[in-house]
Amino acid sequence: MTAQILDGKRIGAQIRDEVAAGVELLRARGLRPPGLAAVLVGENPASRVYVASKVKACAEAGVFSEKIEMPQSSTTAEVLARVEALNRREDIDGILVQLPLPPQVDEGAVLSLIDPAKDVDGFHPVNVGRLVLGQPAFEPCTPAGIMQMLRRSGVRLQGKRAVVVGRSHIVGKPMALLLLREHATVTICHSRTQDLPGVCREADVLVAAIGKATLITHEFIRPGAVVVDVGMNRITNPEEAARAFGGDEARIRQVREKGSTLVGDVLPTAMWELASLYTPVPGGVGPLTIAMLLSNTLKSAKIRLGA
Ligand code: NDP
């Protein structure tokens, strides 16, 4: 089996170009650009990197963005007050609160205060409920991006067996709902699932959203399956990299020279050898998440501007 890649980089760029064109159309009609506010609480280095890349992507697509930084010691009340102020801003169409929040901040209270009409991450209970009911909603960016990638790559889902490993609110659960909406027969697995390899082997479409480097190996993948690897894990051990990437010398060198490399939840050699289509890490699912954030922000702006 010669596996082909699902090219998230290319499809993400395509979606971002479409957003830029949509922003241009608003401008041409004399309307303001879409606006996104990113609330960053505390010093988490990964969160800082994510917010910086979101802000950069906004600028490239012509979307106005504002980064709101708050100290690590912020209280729930202080974060709620910021969100409340953003809810009232005319020029802000999308509000994202970068997770995780510091432990003293009540994440549920914060996410629930975001105006559902500005909830471009799709985490507000109203949007989650709408998604469950099949009503128009802001869909969480990572699973929404995966659906775009599958659609644009011609993967047919109707009647197919889909297995999602992971049941988080951010990826696993909404992923399963979106696959169900496209008439796949969906199974959700998690840490207590019995015979995980056996269940995964039934999948025509396997989505791994676990957060455990290379947990999914050859025995989990049905030959010819479509494999979507959401996981983003760093490995630092050259032997582990050699096992994961087989003869891919560049990756092994990266670990030796830079100290680490990125790997998904699926063993790369297993995807290469068994899948018909698969998402590489990096360059698979990652680029779609930000693209869908921009797309949701444009969608919100168009609704709010009546455009
Ligand atoms: P969570 O930690 O919230 O959820 C992980 C899920 O995996 C849980 O449902 C857990 O089960 C399940 N799980 C853990 N261990 C096992 C196991 N041994 N067997 C079966 N299931 C298991 O993670 P997220 O959903 O937020 O993220 C998952 C991965 O995706 C991470 O690597 C993250 O970095 C990445 N990610 C990538 C994004 C991108 O843009 N590319 C965006 C978002 C996430 P249980 O519920 O029983 O504990």
Image: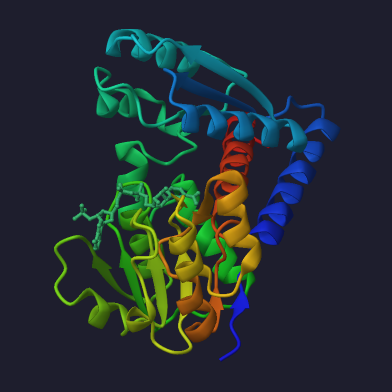
Coloring applied to the structure: rainbow
To which quarter of the image does residue 184 belong? Answer: bottom left
Q: Position of residue 228 (x, y in %)?
A: 47, 68
230 versus 126 height, above or below: below
To which quarter of the image does residue 100 belong? Answer: top left
How many marks overall? 0
Q: Is residue 118 visible?
A: no
Q: Quadrant of the N terminus?
A: bottom right
What is the residue that sits farthest to the right in this orientation?
Answer: 28
Q: Position of residue 290 (x, y in %)?
A: 59, 44
Q: Is 305 situated left or right of 270 in this image? A: right
Q: Is residue 187 visible?
A: yes
Q: Residue at x 66, y 62 (%)?
A: 250
Pick the residue in front: 196 or 153. Answer: 196
Q: Residue at x 48, y 21 (%)?
A: 39
Q: Position of residue 266 (x, y in %)?
A: 42, 67
Q: Quadrant of the C terminus?
A: top right
33 versus 121 height, above or below: above
Q: Is 236 situated left or right of 66 in this image? A: left
Pick the residue in front: 268 or 22. Answer: 268
Q: Residue at x 55, y 67 (%)?
A: 279
Q: Position of residue 301 (x, y in %)?
A: 62, 33
Q: Residue at x 34, y 29 (%)?
A: 111
